[in-house]
Image (cartoon, grey):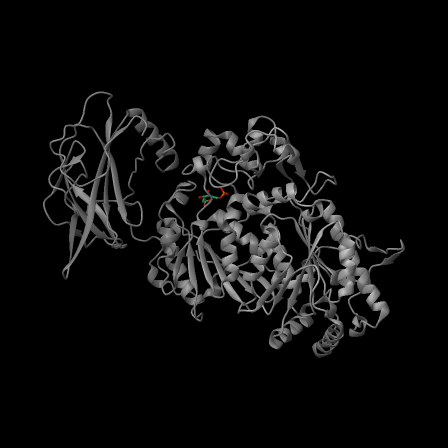
Amino acid sequence: MGTASSKDYDSSSSHGGEEREDQGGGGQLYVSLKMENYNLKGELIPHVYGSVPLVGSWDSSKALALERESMSMWELSFVVPPNHETLDFKFLLKPKNSNLSYVVEEGPNRQLIGGTLQGDKRSAMFNLGADEILEYRVYIKADRVSPFDLAASWRAYQENFQPSTVRGIPDVSINSAAESSNKHGSSANLELDLEDYVVPTPTKSANSGLVYAANMTETPRSLSGGVFSKADGSSDALHGQTDTVISFDRPAMEVIVPDPSNLSSQSGLGESKSVGTFSHPQKQEGHRGLFVDRGVGSPRLVKPENATTLFIDNKHDSEAKNSMPAAAGAVAAAAVADQMLGPKEEQHLAIVLVGLPARGKTFTAAKLTRYLRWLGHDTKHFNVGKYRRLKLGANLAADFFRDDNPEGLEARNEVAALALEDMISWMQEGGQVGILDATNSTRKRRNMLMRMAEGKCKIIFLETICNDRQIIERNIRLKVQQSPDYAEEPDFEAGYHDFKGRLENYEKVYEPVEEGSYIKLIDMVSGHGGQIQMNNISGYLPGRIVFFLVNTHLTPRPILLTRHGESRDNVRGRIGGDSVISDAGELYAKKLANFVEKRLKNERAASIWTSTLQRTILTASPIVGFPKIQWRALDEINAGVCDGMTYEEIKKNMPDEYESRKNDKLRYRYPRGESYLDVIQRLEPVIIELERQRAPVVVVAHQAVLRALYAYFADRPLKEIPHIEMPLHTIIEIQMGVTGVQEKRYKLM
Ligand code: F6P
C-alpha cells in the first residue's frame, strides 16, 4: 500500500500493550473503523459519538454516521497522529429519517489509543427492546500513511468528491453529514399510474413489431434504381413500392489470421493460433496498433510473423474481404478456424427457408438475422415476396400461385433466382450469412437454388412445419392485416378468402425437405415441446443457429430492462466499482418495486435478474414476490485498470487510452478489462435464456450491459451499441410476441 505500513483488519481486540511507532517519517495514522451485520436493518444507520478530539461531542444528535460500504458493512475512517490522545466513544444506531430516537450500544465506552482499540474484543450490542438484541462485529485497521499520500488523496477527494486509489494509497473516506431526511419525498406515497410515466421511445427503437417483418428485409439490388433489369437485359418500370428501406452498414474491421501454410513451421504455434478483433487500420503502426487483448478470458492476439492481415470494409469490393465477423471471442475464433480449415464455399452460409405460407417463416428469418447480426456475423435477410412485389406488383390473386399456372410459376422462380443472385453477389463482397425467405416448397425449386449456389455458398434448408390449426389461423389473420400484399384490399374477409386460396394452391404441391443439409422445426413456435430434426449439420455457426432455434419461441411476454438506481459512484462520476446506491437510487428502488408489482400483478410467474454487483442487488431488493437471480454475465463492463476513475482522470493520466476508446469504443478493450465486443460475447447465454423464458423477466443491470442487450431486441448495428442512450431511473419494456418486438419506456424519476 504505497508508503503506508498497515495493520490488517482484526476483529475488535485488545492491542493495549502493543507499542506503535510514532516517530520517523512524520506519518499519520489512517484509521478505518468498521461494523458488520448480516441481519440487514436498512433503516438503522450506525453512528459514533464521543469525546471532543474524535467526534466533538457526547451529544447524540451530533453523532457521525458510518458510511455503508457493502450490504453488511459500515465504515468510518479518519486520520490521527500516531501519538494521538485517548479517544473514547460509543456506537449508536439511528433510524434513517429521524434524529429523535436512537439506541446506544450496551457496555462501557470504547477507547482508542495509538490506532488500536483497548480492552477485550467485543461486538457492539444494541438492545432494541422486546428481547431483540442486534449485534454488530467491530473491526479496526490502522495504517501509517505519509504526508504526501495524504495530500494526494485529499486532492483527489477535492477534485472528484471521492477518495482515489489511483496512486495506491488507502481510501480516505470523508463521511457525509448525518443522514438527512429523504429529500425526494417519502416512499409511502409511491402509488403509480403506469401510463403517467410513459415517455416517447427514441426514433431508432425496437418497434419493428408494428411493421411487417418482410418490409425490414434487404432492398433488392437487382431491382433497384426504379427500373427492373430482367435477365434478358430489358427493363420494366417498377410497380408501386411499399417496402421500407433499412440499410445496415457494418463497421470496417481488421482481423489478423495466421497464414495456414506457415503454421506448422512456426515456433510458438500455440500462441500464433490465437486471435482477437480490433482496431482500425490506422492503428497498426507501432506496438499499440496490435495491442488489443489485455487478458480477462478472451483470446489473446499475438501477431505471428507470417500473418495475413484481412480488412473487411463493405464499402470496398475486394478479394481480401471475407466472412470474418465484426466480433470478439468465440465468434472471431470460429470464423478464423473456418477460414483456415473449411472449404471456400462454406465460408458463406445460405439459410434457405422452406414451408407453407403462414408458418412463421418470415418471423423466424427476422429473428435469426437479428441474433446473428448481434453476435457480429454479417447477415442479411432476403425476402422473395419483396422481390415479387417490386417486380410484379402487390395485388396478385390466389391463382397466380397455382403450380399449374406456367406464367405464375416462371415469374415466381425468376424472383427467387434474383434474390439468390443478389445474396451470392453480396456474399462475394464479404457477406457471411444470407437468409433466403420464401416458401421453396417444391423439390424442383430447391434443386434450382442448389445448382445456383454450387461452389459459392453452403445451403442449409430451414423448414418450419406447424400443425396447430389455431396458430395457423392466427398467422393467416396477421398476414392479411400486415402484408403489403393486402394493403390495398380494404375488405378483410376478401383478403382472408384470397389468402386461404393461395395457401391451398401451395398445399397441393408441397414437398417437405428430405434432401441436402436441413433443420426442420416441427411445432416449435409455441415453445411447448415440438420437434427439431436435422440432417448433415455441422460447424460452429450451424451449431449456434440450431441452439438458438431450439430456444426461441413466440409466446408473448414482457422483458423489463433497467439500470440500477443511481449509485454513489454515479454521483461522483466514477466508472466501475461496486458502490452502493445513493438516496435517489434508493428512492428509485422503491419506485421500481412498486412499478414491478403493478406491471406484473396479473402474471403467474416472473423473475428478477441482477448482476452480482451491489448497486443492482440493492436496487432489486425492495421487489418482493418473485425469485431473484444474480448473473455474473450481467456485471458492468470491466474497466480494468481504469476501474474507479473518472473519465477526466483517464483523459489526464492515460491520454492514449482515452483517445483509443474515443476512436473505437466498440472494440477498445480497457487494459486488463473488457471491450463492448467482449461484453456482447459474454451476454450471449443471457440472450438465449431471455429467448427461452416464457414468463416476464426484469433485468436490473448496468449501462454498457443494457446497451448490448437492448441492441439485440432493437436490432441495432454493433457500431451503435456503445452510444445507445441508456438513462438512469427509466424502464424499457420490451414486448416479445408474435408480431416481433415492441418497446415502451417508463421514466419513474
Ligand atoms: O458510469 C456508469 C457506467 O456503468 C460505468 O460503470 C461504466 O464503465 C460505464 O457506465 C459504461 O459506459 P461507457 O461505455 O459509455 O463508458
Residue 8: quarter of image: top left
- 417 up-or-down from 633: above or below: below
Q: Quadrant of the C terminus?
A: bottom left
Q: Quadrant of the N terminus?
A: top left
Q: Is residue 5 visible?
A: yes
Farthest residue, direction top: 24
Please state which of residues 140 and 95 is positioned toward the viewer in this rendering. Answer: 140
Q: Residue at x 61, y 59 (%)?
A: 367
| Residue 39 % position (x, y) | 25, 55
Q: Residue at x 15, y 39 (%)?
A: 13
| Residue 524 % position (x, y) | 58, 67
Please state which of residues 315 and 56 is positioned toward the viewer in this rendering. Answer: 315
Total tally of numbered discs in the picture: 0
Q: Is residue 241 visible?
A: no
Please state which of residues 431 and 96 is positioned toward the viewer in this rendering. Answer: 431
| Residue 338 % position (x, y) | 63, 44
Position of 644 compared to 528: left or right? left
| Residue 655 % position (x, y) | 50, 30
Please state which of residues 502 and 99 is positioned toward the viewer in this rendering. Answer: 502
Q: Residue at x 56, y 69 (%)?
A: 530
